[in-house]
Image (cartoon, helix red, strand yellow):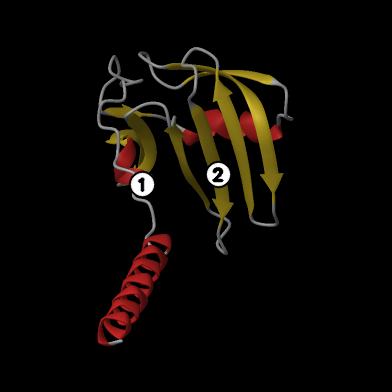
């Protein structure tokens, strides 16, 4: 009888140990490691591309499905199709799918503050590639700054 009690106690402890371990595994979130081997989409372009935001004013008047062609700089011509558009009282945003760089999207927003001055925010990004551009304002000059995709997002 003494051995039967020990066997039951061992089985009982083993059962709860196994079920407790499997419950712990269910609560662990999967972690995706960044893929640093993604190809670069903008390898042929410089790290900084100056631009005039006034060149984008017409883009905010286009409707989804319409095409646009923007000469951002002497080295960077932007061709694409409007994917979506949204407007609020003090802001407008447009998403443009690039034609000549498949997978890339330009997301640009124009924000008007309480002084009626305009500010531009945005990115050119592709989740299939390792590089992207972000709009930066420095000393009154807008430019696209090249960054790594994982500097802006995490998987």
Identify the residue at the far front of this view.
1
User: Which tag is nearer the camera, tag 2 or tag 1?
Assistant: 1
Crowding around mark 2 (Cα neighbors within 10 Å: few <14, some 14 to 19, many 20+) is many
Q: Do the residues labelled 2 and 1 touch (CB within 8 Å)?
A: no
For the N terminus, give its image quadrant.
Answer: bottom left
Give the image location of residue 100, x and y in percent: 49, 12
- Front residue of 99 and 14: 14
**Left or right placement of residue 12 versus residue 69 in this view:** left
Question: What residue is rendered at 43% in x and 61% in y?
Answer: 26
**Left or right placement of residue 109 versus residue 15 in this view:** right
- Which type of secondary structure does the marked residue at label 1 adopt? loop
Q: Is residue 68 visible?
A: yes
Question: What residue is rendered at 65% in x and 27% in y?
Answer: 82
Give the image location of residue 37, x and y in percent: 26, 26
Question: What residue is rendered at 36% in x and 20% in y?
Answer: 41
Q: Earlier in the sequence, mark 2 or mark 1?
A: 2
Q: Determine which residue is flagged by label 2.
A: 109
Q: Can residue 140 be seen in this view?
A: no
Give the image location of residue 83, x and y in percent: 66, 30
Q: Relative to 22, is 112 above or below?
A: above
Give the image location of residue 133, x and y in percent: 37, 33
Crowding around mark 1 (Cα neighbors within 10 Å: few <14, some 14 to 19, many 20+) is few
Residue 32, image quadrant: top left
Residue 43, image quadrant: top left
- Which type of secondary structure does the marked residue at label 2 adopt? strand
The tag on residue 154 is 1
Q: Quote the CA–CA distance across marks 2 and 1.
A: 22 Å
**Left or right placement of residue 71 versus residue 47 in this view:** right
Q: Relative to 49, is 3 above or below?
A: below
Q: Relative to 140, is 49 above or below?
A: above
């Amino acid at each position: 009888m003494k051995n039967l009690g020990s066997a039951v106690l061992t089985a009982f402890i083993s059962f709860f140990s196994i079920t407790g371990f499997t419950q712990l595994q269910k609560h662990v979130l999967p972690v995706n490691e960044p893929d640093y081997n993604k190809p670069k989409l903008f390898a042929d372009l410089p790290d900084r591309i100056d631009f005039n935001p006034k060149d984008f004013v017409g883009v905010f008047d286009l409707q989804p499905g319409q095409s646009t062609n923007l000469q951002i700089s002497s080295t960077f011509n932007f061709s694409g199709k409007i994917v979506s558009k949204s407007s609020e009282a003090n802001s407008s945003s447009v998403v443009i799918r690039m034609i000549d760089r498949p997978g890339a999207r330009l997301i640009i927003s124009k924000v008007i503050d309480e002084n009626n001055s305009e500010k531009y925010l945005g990115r050119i990004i592709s989740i299939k590639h390792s590089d992207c551009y972000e709009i930066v304002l420095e000393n009154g000059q807008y430019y696209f700054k090249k960054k790594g995709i994982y500097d802006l997002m995490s998987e």
